[in-house]
């Protein structure tokens, strides 16, 4: 019977009426279309993944850079080799400063090695690839507080008493009198160089730093060169330097040639070369101060790589962390707060081509460093 219960009458509850509850109406929320914010969610997720990957790569790059720079540094265990038979360490006045950076006085023996090892060192230094000498020797004394310093140059032609040292070939060497200062390095390397300096000065060397030919040139280039002023023309066939009197901005190779020049200036002695080397020390300090290394990680890494690749240190400075702490503790130093002097010497009475310490002036100088 029409209209009875169970019939599918149009409009009744059994009909599928468009728009009724549960119907998949075009445009309704239940249809296959995603909310408007769904695309952005995927974008944010992708950006997060990219950022995470970038962070991992950045951290991995930083870790590799640290390992590489740390691995560059070569070291010698001078403290263990020399034992306790050494001058006493300098006394440091206790302060209330809780800074994690060291601030006490320091004496650092800095040697420039004329090693011919490696193609670049041979090209820059010439001569045989066998052996090495301490072409440049400086004691860097940093005052307590580390805002002022004195750089004392030791002429390599100075005749000294070389103490008995551990030799490169094993065993020990005999004490020798009236021998050239730079023979200590040639005979016994850094250990004998430090022991000889301590014997002649009675000043404890807290640290040892050595840089070779190629390393010095690379460091100057990484810093963008150095600016120096010379008072006279320089023409030296040995160092291949031709320079008119005046102010010049030098690259690494030219700066190294200036540091090695002796025959093209003054009386041709080592004392004339020392004057040029001291100019370079101050020029390097000025260049470091003028260079915004922290503002450019790439530039900072380039300088750090050049420096660490060429360094040999004592074991107290043989990590990047220790070198960075030393550098940060010396950040107040500048060319204006750094004094350069030369060890007082006189011509040796028995050899006018050599010099000896002038006393009592030399003794007073060493006393001021203790």
Image: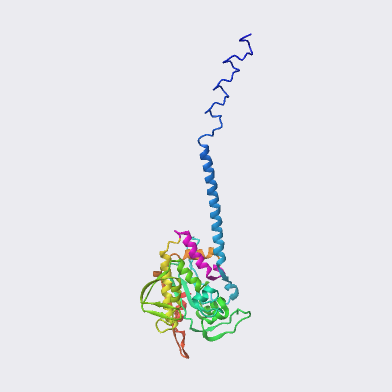
Q: Position of residue 127 (x, y in %)?
A: 52, 80
Q: Is residue 17 visible?
A: yes
Is residue 273 found left or right of 89 in the rendered image? left
Q: Foreground: 92 or 56?
A: 56
Q: Where does the image place residue 90, in percent across and percent down from the top left? A: 50, 72
- Of 298 and 157, nearer the camera is 298
The spot of residue 342 in percent (x, y) is: 43, 79
Horizontally, is 284 left or right of 74 in the view? left
User: Can residue 204 be seen in this snapshot?
Assistant: no
Quadrant of image for the N terminus:
top right
Q: Residue at x 47, y 71 (%)?
A: 217
Question: Could you tell me which residue is drawn at 53 percent across and 65 percent down?
Answer: 322
Residue 120 placed where, x, y %?
A: 52, 73
Horizontally, is 330 left or right of 72 in the view? left
- In the rendered image, which quarter is residue 284 located in? bottom left
- Nearer the observer, 329 or 365: 329
Colouring? rainbow
Query: Measured along the vertical axis of the image, is residue 327 above or below residue 135?
Result: above
Query: In this picture, which residue range is highlighted in magenta?
Result: 294-317
Q: Main secondary structure of the magenta part?
A: helix
| 327 relative to 43, above or below | below
In the depicted structure, whether residue 298 falls above or below residue 162: above
Figure label count: 0
Which residue appears farthest toward the top when viewing the image?
1
- Write down the quadrant of residue 193 in the picture: bottom right
Whether 67 is drawn above or below 236: the answer is above
């Amino acid at each position: 019977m029409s209209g009875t219960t169970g019939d599918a009458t149009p409009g009744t509850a059994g009909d599928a009426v468009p728009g009724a509850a549960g119907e998949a109406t075009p445009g309704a929320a239940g249809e296959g279309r995603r909310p408007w914010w769904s695309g952005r969610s995927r974008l944010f997720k992708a950006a997060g993944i990219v950022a995470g990957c970038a962070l991992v790569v950045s951290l991995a790059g930083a870790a590799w850079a640290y390992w590489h720079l740390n691995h560059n540094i070569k070291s010698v265990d001078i403290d263990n080799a020399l034992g306790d038979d050494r001058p006493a360490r300098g006394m440091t006045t206790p302060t209330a400063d809780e800074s994690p950076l060291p601030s006490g006085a320091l004496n650092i023996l800095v040697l420039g090695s004329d090693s011919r090892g490696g193609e670049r060192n041979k090209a820059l230094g010439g001569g045989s690839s066998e052996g090495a000498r301490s072409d440049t020797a400086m004691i860097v004394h940093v005052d307590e507080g580390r805002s002022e310093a004195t750089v004392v140059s030791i002429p390599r032609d100075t005749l000294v008493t070389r103490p008995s040292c551990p030799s490169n070939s094993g065993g020990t060497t005999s004490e020798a009198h009236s021998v050239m200062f730079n023979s200590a390095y040639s005979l016994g390397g850094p250990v004998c160089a430090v022991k000889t300096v301590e014997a002649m000065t009675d000043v404890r060397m807290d640290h040892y730093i050595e840089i070779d030919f190629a390393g010095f040139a690379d460091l100057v280039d990484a810093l963008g060169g150095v600016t120096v002023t010379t008072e006279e023309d320089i023409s030296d066939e040995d160092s291949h330097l031709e320079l008119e009197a005046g102010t010049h901005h030098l690259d690494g190779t030219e700066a190294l040639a200036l540091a090695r020049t002796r025959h093209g200036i003054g009386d041709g002695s080592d004392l004339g070369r020392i004057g040029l080397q001291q100019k370079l020390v101050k020029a390097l300090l000025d260049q470091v101060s003028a260079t915004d290394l922290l503002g450019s990680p790439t530039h900072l890494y380039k300088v750090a790589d050049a420096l660490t690749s060429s360094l040999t240190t004592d074991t107290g400075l043989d990590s990047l962390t220790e070198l960075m702490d030393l550098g940060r503790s010396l950040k107040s130093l500048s060319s204006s707060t750094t004094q350069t002097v030369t060890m007082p010497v006189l011509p040796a009475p028995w050899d006018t081509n050599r010099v000896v310490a002038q006393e009592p002036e030399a003794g007073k100088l060493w006393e001021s460093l203790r």
